[in-house]
Image: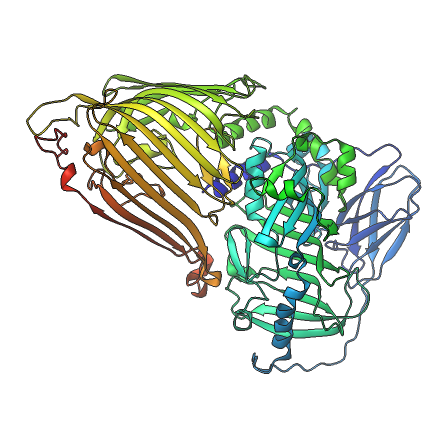
Amino acid sequence: MVLRTLLILLTAALAAVCPAVTHAAGAGDRFIRGIVRDSVSAQGLPYASVTVQPSGASAVASADGIFEINLPEGSMSITAGCQGYAPRTVPVKKSGINLYDIYLQPVATELRELEVRRKKYSKRNNPAVDFARRIKEAGKDTDPRRNEYYSFDRYRRISLGINDFDTTGQSAMLRRLPFLIEHVDSSDVDGAPVLNISLKEVAETVNTRHKGKREKVTVRGVRSNGVDEFIDRQNVQSLLDDLLREVDLYDNDITLMRNTFVSPLSPIAPDFYRFYLVDSTATVDGFDGPHISLAFYPRNKQSFGFSGHLYVAAGDTSMFVRRVEMRAPHDINLNFIDELIVEQNYDRAPDGSRLRRNDNLVMLMSVMPNTPQLYVSRKIGYRNHSFERPADADSIFGTLGDTHEMACAESRDSMFWVAERHLPEPEGESKADLLMKRLRQKPVIYWGEKILRILSTGYVGTGPDSKFDIGPVNTFASYNSLEGLRLRAGGTTTAQLSQHWFGRGYVAYGFHDRKWKYSAEAEYSFNAKKLHSREFPVHSVRLSHRYDVDRLGSHYLYTNADNFVLSLSRMSDRRFSYLRESKLEYTLELENNFSVEATVSHRSQEASGYLRFITADGTDLGHFGMSTVGVRLRYAPGEKFYQTKSHRYPVNADAPVFELSHVFAPRDFAGSRYGLNRTELSVSKRVRMSLLGFLDLALAGGHVWGAAPFTELLIPNANLSYTIQPRSFALMNPMEFVNTSFVSLHATWHLRGLLFNRIPGVRKLGLREVVGFSGIWGHMSDKALPTVANGLPLFPE
């Protein structure tokens, strides 16, 4: 859900960036335009190549044959070429005319007759299948991580752009934004023009240790520029790291864009792929000598696999893979992904280990109809491979967490990036930092960015360096059966005011119950924050007090109870009480995603017009208080999440999450009318099942030790909204079941079109199969049943 929302917001930002036609040439350069034509039909030749001599500057023509290029000073001639045509060279015009019309002559090639007969494919006694098996078996002998220590420097560059960018249009918007042409490069898919609108670079060092299978990443530099600057950098990085993962050919499965593809070297690959030995004299760019090409194609084009080639040097008995080329077939229906291409190259270390040279991925995406197609390029370069023990190995592997970002990572200068950037940098990408500066000069872009920032963060800033943000905006107005129309206003301070002290709060008013509600919070963070108090990792002391409605049996995980989207519900529910709570919290969150939260609170439950607290002897309590002490332990190794100012949304559900909590309230202590002793435990994990999709599991259980009022018992969360709320029950009403012991299981199986993709006609609808199960077993102890002796309030009717 978070991914889909962010892609829609990004597409909206891209829609505001429209094509342009003019260009501001650099000093000493000349900017020219022209068209490459067929000399017979005079039609433009799509994607013809144009090269300037002697500088070697090149460009690719559009689908209409139109090209634009800078002529460096001293240029003598221009050469145009296209497959099936004889190349032609024309001299550079010395006059001021910058338009060229180049005609190419078709070249006819007579081919001898070739008869092709289809032979039934079989994996038995197939040398290609045996070749793939030998590559897989040799993988452990070339794995660099088999050494006790292995380290390397990694440079990652992710660029986003508008694909098939029109560089010849004459619309009013193009004339208003002429500088966009400076950010245009050529697509790695088909050579079409691409307008670069976002660039992210990361320079890091990776250290691995064979003992314990440990991997530590030190981020030495981070840079981000482009139209998506309205989204927090760390959130974007977490999403991209999860969506555009590195590809390990020797894994059984390859995970990209949250989909799992069967690897051509998987144990089930012979049953999943068709293998062919294509050519034993193939040449591979960057490597000497002939290579054997192993081609592979999914047996079923609708299955989640790749088609492509593996290249192994001819005569190499070690089966060392030099190059990988893979493409996702169009028939597998990857939602909004139209094209997905992966390329990798490997070098051989002296000990035979495979050293990754680069890992390149290119995607074309269509998020919404009638919007620009997105171009995504993820390029990774590797160098400085070493098997020596690092001098500071103890400090590297002794730190908590798998990733450590240096304090100066975000403030690196241009000299640092020149040294780290060992991949070729296209001219358009190199100017990404200038894009937003120019766009913000346009009022439409300036205000559009502000709106998109509000939608992505949920808060409204009060200035360029906002010290107080107003929000969340989705709680300004809502409706429920008890309060009727509810209006709310609030906000939170930011790190611009103080990096250690934070405050937040709100006031709300219900027009039906005619009551004011409020919340006030003060927090001291021991860690200096960059943006807001909820940033990872949290180490703070927080004091809060609130008075608001308590929706018993409808406590959601990832949203506010008064989110306006939840106002539309499937039934009317008035089982609300009023809760007055004062709480002191201490939170310690470590880099390895282990956290401890200790709380001391006093809670007072007050009756509403629809929910009263009446004991078995007929006494109407009106309200009752409880003073509690609680502790919560949470461990989620490898967890990534999208962090807002109010909530965290999980990004990679592959990480297991363990939670244990206990709340204790002594009876007749510090205003406690009743006692409480409650323990809860939960475990959640995503299980990937290769071509069968993946399964999201959440197992939870709890027990109340002794007697307690029904408001503090274990009440399953009922989902009354028309949205999907995790770990809630859509076929249950609030407080329909109340337990002192329970075990629940939530399972969701995503089949990813395993069945629908094979049904003609249905596949084109883009439907996906999702099978869900939510079940709970509960028990009510006799000790918690209201009696005259224990004085517990009766259950509501």
Residue at 49 percent across and 61 percent down: it is 690
The image quadrant of residue 784 is top left
The N terminus, quarter of image? top left
Residue 619 x/y as whole percent? 9, 23
Residue 328 x/y as whole percent? 58, 59
Residue 448 x/y as whole percent? 56, 28
> 347 or 288, which is in the foreground?
347
From the viewer's perspective, is 355 left or right of 522?
right
> 41 or 3, which is in the foreground?
3
The C terminus, quarter of image? top left
Residue 257 x/y as whole percent? 54, 50
> 480 or 465, which is in the foreground?
465
From the viewer's perspective, is 707 left or right of 374?
left
Q: Is residue 377 visible?
A: yes
Q: Is residue 160 visible?
A: no
Q: As displayed, is residue 278 above or below residue 473?
A: below
